[in-house]
Image (cartoon, rainbow, N blue to C red):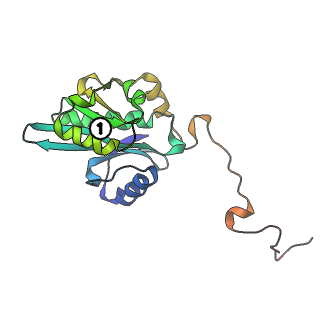
Amino acid sequence: MYVRDAKNRDEVWLLDRIEEMGFDETSFRSRDYVIAVDEESNERAGFGRIRLHKTDDGDYCELTCVGVLERWRGQGVGAHVVERLVKEAGDEGFEEVYCFTDNPAYLTQFGFERVEPASLPDPLAERFEAKRGDDDSVEPVRLAVDDLEIPDRHRERFKQASPHGRDGDVAIEETAEDFGIDPDETTYKYDTG
């Protein structure tokens, strides 16, 4: 498993996942995203985005649209997407990043701290209000780029990540119904019954 920059060929996949997860696709540009990919199957497992807010008073960096496909959850994929986004923000000269989330506890384990909405800089305050809408569970969090901490348990899970989750391979039994066949009505060429 590794995390890489998104490529143009990932655009359709990203847009489909963003829609499935109900994320905001405002100002979509695939080059702003990173994608977690399984090395063996080349299957995409998760993604995230850096969104820049440029103002006359300074620029601000937001991590947004961090998502992990359901069958890849609980395996450190999201942690590594966040880590890559924070590293890229630091490489672009940002000392801190913001995120607006309905699950702040997930991000606080990496060093993010809750922020009072009233203390947000103007462009981020506007973005927060737009992102929050009617959902009072959305909270702003902030991280100093140098303070990012990824717990070892996430690193170990990420190394062993698989599309079947932490329980290992799960046998999937296919039935006739999976192929649109009604087993009660269908006759077969070599049916001996």
Rendered residue at 91%/72% (across/down): 192
Give the answer, above or below, for where 101 lies relative to 44: above
Q: Residue furthest bottom?
A: 189
Q: Position of residue 131 (x, y in %)?
A: 32, 44
Which residue in the protein does label 1 denote? 85
Q: Residue furthest right?
A: 193
Give the answer, above or below, for where 25 lies relative to 180: above
Viewer can see residue 143: yes
> If the image is split into quadrants, where does the C terminus sit?
bottom right
Crowdedness of circle 1 by 10 Å Cα count: few (<14), some, many (20+)? many
Rendered residue at 25%/43% (across/down): 127
- Apparent side of residue 102 relative to residue 56 in the rendered image (left or right): right
Q: How many marks?
A: 1
Rendered residue at 50%/34% (across/down): 75
Quadrant of the rendered image containing residue 139: top left
Viewer can see residue 36: no
Rendered residue at 53%/40% (across/down): 162
Q: Position of residue 107 (x, y in %)?
A: 38, 29
Q: Position of residue 23 (x, y in %)?
A: 38, 49
Quadrant of the rendered image containing residue 164: top right
Q: Residue furthest left?
A: 56
Q: Position of residue 82 (x, y in %)?
A: 35, 35
The kind of residue tagged 1 is Leu
> If the image is split into quadrants, where does the N terminus sit?
top left
Task: Compare residues 41 and 12 and report the one nearer the observer.
Answer: 12
Give the answer, above or below, for where 142 lies relative to 44: above
